[in-house]
Image (cartoon, rainbow, N blue to C red):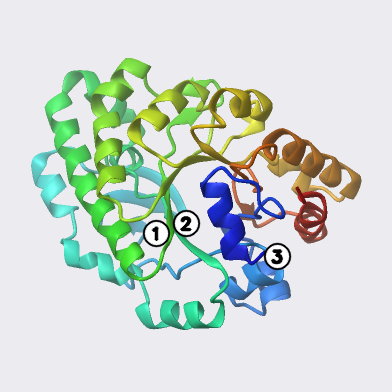
């Protein structure tokens, strides 16, 4: 089967010739240089991944991921998120770019070229534009979470604002060729969700429903941490599936597959730490575990539980995908 056919089968909870190989973020610069000659999309293809990203970029002139306050009110120090400055309605107006700013994230010509180069692959778009994540980063966590109790009206205004931009950017990605969307919305710690289920239902679930309803492609939800308690609301919101399923946070793929495998496409669960070492037997064991737990009946795409980031062992990463393609046959 072609890569596109495998991904479609998984999204429809059907078994293909093998489990699709998927990765939202290949953030390891050495891997991209070695495998793809510096070309990110070629790296996906050379590694045997079935779904590859459309081009996405930090807008020129933005301070995001560098130093200072960016256009969304997020504070960055030496490339790391360090807080937020949006505390008032005036701040919200100042740190809310116009909808036309969406176009600055994309390179339409590059994306069109990639679609012609890789016509048999499924194209996806993924980035952290979920309203919950965008809101707590704009305010800073130390301000956002108390504000849910003390200033719920302002929080709702901020969440609605970020939802509008989220919908706009997902729509633009679909217009450019994204066939499945990954909504980055980190909502949990290792101990469970960041807010109570009641608060999630009140503040976030209606926005997720709207995002899914207005999206023009199926939407996967990405979140680190133990999201297990939130999975019923992922189904209720209409997400096609869930990405990350972090085992180190206690997410049990076998149990999630049993409880939600008919309602959510499951993506991920490969433990990242085994890819930071040189023990290839451990890598292969982790591959076998995930495929044996996730693959039966379809509706599973093989992936790490996070991303392929700088510092991972390149031999371990390459062996993971090679062995997964070998072991993933139905």
Of tags 2 and 3, the one toward the viewer is 3
Asked if labels 3 and 1 touch by Cβ distance under 8 angstroms, the answer is no
The residue that mark 2 highlights is: 79
Label 1 to label 2, Cα distance in Å? 6 Å
Give the mark, 1 or 3, whose residue is nearer the N terminus. Answer: 3
Disc ID at residue 145: none
Label 2 to label 3, Cα distance in Å? 31 Å
Q: Residue at (47%, 60%) from the top-left corner? A: 124
Give the mark, 2 or 3, whose residue is nearer the N terminus. Answer: 3
Q: Residue 36, position in %: x, y?
A: 67, 76
Q: Residue 259, position in %: x, y?
A: 56, 22
Viewport quadrant of the N terminus: bottom right
Q: Is residue 316 visible?
A: yes
Element class at badge 1: loop
Answer with the quarter of the image where residue 291 lies. Answer: top right
Q: Residue 67, position in %: x, y?
A: 39, 59
Label 1 to label 3, Cα distance in Å? 36 Å
The residue that mark 1 highlights is: 67
Element class at badge 3: loop
Element class at badge 2: loop
Q: Dot 3: few (<14), some (14–19), or many (≥20) neighbours within 10 Å? A: some
The residue that mark 3 highlights is: 48
Q: Dot 1: few (<14), some (14–19), or many (≥20) neighbours within 10 Å? A: some
């Amino acid at each position: 089967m072609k890569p596109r056919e495998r991904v479609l089968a998984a999204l429809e909870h059907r078994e293909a010739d093998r489990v699709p190989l998927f990765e939202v973020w290949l953030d390891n610069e050495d891997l991209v240089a070695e495998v793809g000659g510096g070309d990110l999309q070629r790296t996906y293809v050379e590694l045997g991944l079935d779904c590859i990203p459309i081009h996405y970029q930090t807008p020129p002139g933005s301070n995001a991921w560098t130093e200072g306050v960016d256009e969304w009110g997020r504070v960055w120090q030496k490339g790391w998120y360090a807080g937020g400055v949006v505390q008032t309605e005036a701040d919200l107006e100042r740190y809310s770019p116009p909808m036309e700013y969406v176009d600055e994230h994309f390179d339409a010509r590059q994306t069109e070229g990639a679609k012609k180069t890789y016509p048999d692959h499924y194209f996806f778009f993924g980035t952290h534009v979920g309203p919950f994540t965008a809101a707590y980063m704009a305010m800073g966590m130390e301000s956002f979470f108390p504000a849910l109790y003390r200033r719920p009206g302002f929080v709702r205004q901020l969440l609605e604002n970020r939802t509008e931009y989220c919908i706009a950017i997902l729509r633009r990605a679909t217009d450019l060729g994204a066939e499945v969307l990954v909504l980055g919305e980190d909502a949990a710690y290792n101990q469970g969700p960041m807010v109570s289920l009641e608060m999630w239902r009140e503040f976030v679930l209606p926005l997720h429903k709207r995002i899914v309803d207005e999206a023009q492609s199926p939407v996967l939800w990405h979140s680190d941490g133990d999201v297990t308690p939130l999975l019923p609301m992922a189904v209720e919101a209409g997400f096609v599936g869930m990405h990350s399923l972090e085992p180190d946070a206690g997410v049990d793929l076998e149990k999630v597959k049993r409880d939600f495998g008919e309602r959510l496409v499951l993506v991920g669960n490969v433990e990242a730490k085994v890819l930071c070492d040189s023990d290839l037997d451990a890598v292969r064991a982790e591959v076998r575990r995930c495929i044996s737990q996730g693959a039966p009946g379809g509706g599973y795409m093989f992936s790490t539980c996070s991303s392929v980031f700088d510092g991972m062992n390149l031999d371990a990463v390459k062996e993971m995908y090679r062995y997964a393609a070998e072991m993933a046959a139905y």
